[in-house]
Amino acid sequence: MEDYTKHVLGLQLPTDPRWVNIAEKNLEDILVDHAYCEQKAASSCISLIVRYPEKEALVDMLTPVVAEEWSHFERVVEQLRKRGLGLGPQRKDEYVIALSKTARSGGSRERQLMDQLLINALIEARSCERFKLLWKNLDDPELQKFYYELMVSEAGHYKNFIRLAKEYMPAEEVDARWKELLLQEADIIRTLEVRPDRIH
Amino acid sequence: MEDYTKHVLGLQLPTDPRWVNIAEKNLEDILVDHAYCEQKAASSCISLIVRYPEKEALVDMLTPVVAEEWSHFERVVEQLRKRGLGLGPQRKDEYVIALSKTARSGGSRERQLMDQLLINALIEARSCERFKLLWKNLDDPELQKFYYELMVSEAGHYKNFIRLAKEYMPAEEVDARWKELLLQEADIIRTLEVRPDRIH
């Protein structure tokens, strides 16, 4: 796991191993939180399209990502319904709030876009790592298959966001900023409480 | 046309016949505005799901509507690209702004929801009426087919929104409010300038 996290996704700190055990005992909360993660991913890509409509590569790459994230939302709701559970209210996402604060508001539009795309990439990478833990450790074969499929999909998205950032900013600058953000993300994960009811 | 508008969609005022002639001369603006109409429709259904997650029928009905509206967004962008055009910035939507002001903020959550659903139904009905004009009058066979298909789809949505309102409020109250809103919508259409570059 640690190898995968570090070498494939670049994440600097693996998830606390206690997380998956406590998450399994709170499947309803995890599924509800997960549904909103997919909704926020879709909404965040819509916002980027509305903010940068003149950037053709961005519109063309993110438009199908919105559709994919939304189909994941639909699938998570289906898993809830199968278990006789409902969607429940949205929760405050401390991880995404903390990560969003690393975005710099100054500089060019392109630099701001780069920060936003790399933050989206980090969220996808961390989700991917957590989905891998759920795939490997859950007791429910249907959910294991489900998290395996989502893990593969999020891994694709995370690379696409980084590639897209390089369309608008020099590759070295993107790589340097990605390294900085990986360290900041690890600090955020280290500081946040390990919660039984959250994907992040 | 007038019959269709009044008897099928319930709209009280048909679109000014000049609109389609001037719209045809501003195809880029119309397509860009249309793309944002689809985006706003998708975003508005996402907002309703996040605001009323405990309402199972709402979540289950609107989740596929988001996917459908987003696929329309994708198809409009494709039509722009085929013509060598880009998405361009979002425009202020005077029609939707005016219509949104008719929503009452007081009363029960369900009454607020009813107003919101009926406003969405009105936007779909008016879009459907305009798409019909584009289908019937445009000179471009591909776009004619495109607007025919979208007209059918929006007609389905408009009925779904009204049906959904009746899940949460008494049918007579929904019907009475729908009649009021149809008159208010006609007033808004009467007051707004006929714009060559807007779907509404």
Image (cartoon, coloured by chain):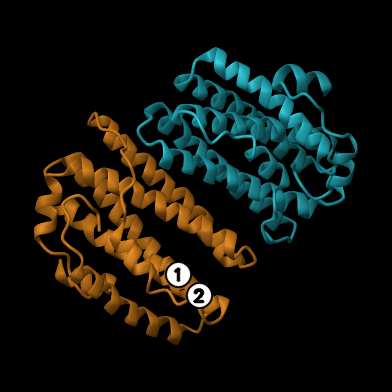
Chain colours: A cyan, B orange
Instruction: Say if labels 2 and 1 share a chain.
Output: yes
Q: What is the secondary structure assignment of the residue under circle 2?
A: helix
Residue B135 at x, y percent in the picture: 19, 51
Tell me which residue sits at (76%, 49%) in the image.
A30
Residue A98 at x, y percent in the picture: 69, 41
Q: Quadrant of the N terminus of chain A?
A: top right
Q: Which residue is mark 2?
A: B112
Residue A161 at x, y percent in the picture: 55, 27
Decide which of A170, A64 is in the foreground and name it: A170
Tell me which residue sits at (45%, 22%) in the image.
A168
- Say if mark 2 contacts mark 1, CB within 8 Å: yes
Task: Name the kind of residue labelled 2 in the image.
Answer: Gln
- Return the chain for callout 2: B
Q: What is the secondary structure assignment of the residue under circle 1?
A: helix
- Return the chain for callout 1: B
* For residue A109, side relative to residue A122 (left or right): left
Tell me which residue sits at (57%, 76%) in the image.
B109
User: Which picture quadrant has residue B96?
Assistant: bottom left
Tell me which residue sits at (62%, 17%) in the image.
A176
Q: Which residue is mark 1?
A: B116
The answer to whether one can see residue B121 in this image is yes
